[in-house]
Image: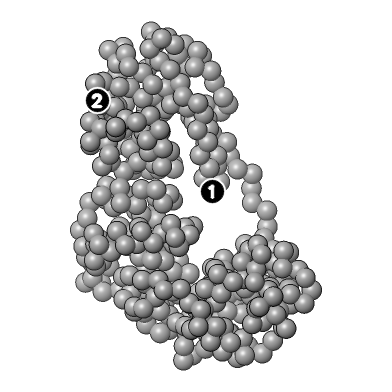
Amino acid sequence: MDKRYFSKKIVEWYLENKRNLPWRDTTDPYKIWLSEIILQQTRVNQGLPYYSRFISRYPDVNKLADAPEQEVLRLWQGLGYYTRARNLHKCAKKIKNDFKGVFPPSFGQLKNLPGIGDYTAAAIASFSFGQQVAVVDGNVFRVLSRIFGISIPINSTEGKKVFTLLANKLIPKDTPDLFNQAIMEFGATYCLPSNPGCVDCIFKQSCKASLHSSQSLLPVKLKPKASRKRYFHYLVFIKGKSLLMKRRQQKDIWFGLFDFPLIENTRPVSLKKLLEKNRLLIGLNSENATATETYKHILTHQTIYCKFVIIRCVDQLKSTGNEGEFYSLRKISRLPKPALISRFLDDYSFYS
């Protein structure tokens, strides 16, 4: 397919079919950056209310930089991948302190900021500053692999180079922003992973995947490593209308968020064995410690199987001062927490 034809055709399609999204009609790098960070690993309909809340609370990068980290994490709660939120905050601080609150205009400078990689740097550089640098995300991989019939795995080193090179050859000098928006939009709304709109597709006469009925085979992706299984028992100590919680310090999932004292095992363990062996639970029995059903929580590379052990006999808590402190339910509602903890709190009506 002629590259100029492809670029012209997909921009025309975009101008007629684009969704009305709040970050589309702006060149403000702050709003574009914020939307791109939120939409990483997140669907548009899920990310949109978070974007609106962040813009309302922090209308510019300086306001975000001045916010306490825990407040930012709390506003982010429910989106997952909390490293994004921490890097968002770090990046805002760096822009305020090192660039006087103004986003640097070049792709290279943007890429050196915390939490900004090639994809986000290209988005800001093209959407805000008109630079001719291609955005390559999952949607772009899918569109290019199908239309041009490329079977190199998209998550391989070679694949990333090949697709990035092709995208940068396709992007026009005069409308790099529209081209990047167009190809991402085409992949997100039309050239879908399953049931793509091939019948009415503007490229159906020249798309290699359509001509060879290989839509389901492209793009090719190397199989991921097996998901790690983890087995949690969260200890929920109750004192009146307060619960014992602590801020996670270890460099693991949910770093910086609040959860309950945790016992982790390599395999499922019965409540009886848990009560017998853990120092925090010595003296307790099934009459004053009950376990919930198992909660299954799926993350990118791991699956957590979790039970919450509800303990009302707090006088027997053998505290060493490292288990945390008791917080009122009102305070807990404002603490940044993993979605798994919020699910449990909602299920057991602690806030009602």
Among the two numbered marks 2 and 1 on one chain, the one whose residue lies closer to the N terminus: 2
The number of callouts visible is 2
Position of residue 191 measured from the top left corner of the image (x, y, whole percent): 62, 71
Q: Quadrant of the N terminus?
A: bottom right
* Mark-to-mark CA distance, 2 and 1: 35 Å
Q: Quadrant for residue 120, please give it.
A: bottom left
Q: Position of residue 91 (x, y in %)?
A: 32, 62
Mark 1 Cα shell of 10 Å, populated few (<14), some (14-19), many (≥20): few
Q: Which residue is mark 2?
A: 241
Q: Residue at x 22, y 55 (%)?
A: 67
Coloring applied to the structure: one colour
Mark 2 nearby-residue class (10 Å; few <14, some 14–19, many ≥20): few
Quarter of the picture holding the C terminus: top left
Pick whichever, 181 or 109, lies toward us: 181
In the rendered structure, the answer to whether residue 1 lies left or right of residue 190 reads right
Q: Which amino acid type is shown beneath numbered disc 1?
A: Thr
Label 2: which secondary element? loop
The image shows residue 42, relative to residue 74, as above or below, that is: below
Tell me which corner region of the image, top left, top right, bottom left or bottom right, holds residue 87.
Answer: bottom left
Amino acid type indicated by mark 2? Lys
Give percent across and percent down for residue 97: 22, 66
Residue linked to disc 1: 300
For residue 99, side relative to residue 144 (left or right): left
Q: Residue at x 46, y 73 (%)?
A: 19
Q: Nearer the viewer, mark 2 or mark 1?
A: 2
Q: Residue at x 69, y 63 (%)?
A: 220
Q: Where in the figure is residue 27, as x and y percent of width and height? A: 34, 79
Name the secondary structure under disc 1. Answer: loop
Farthest residue toward the right?
Answer: 212
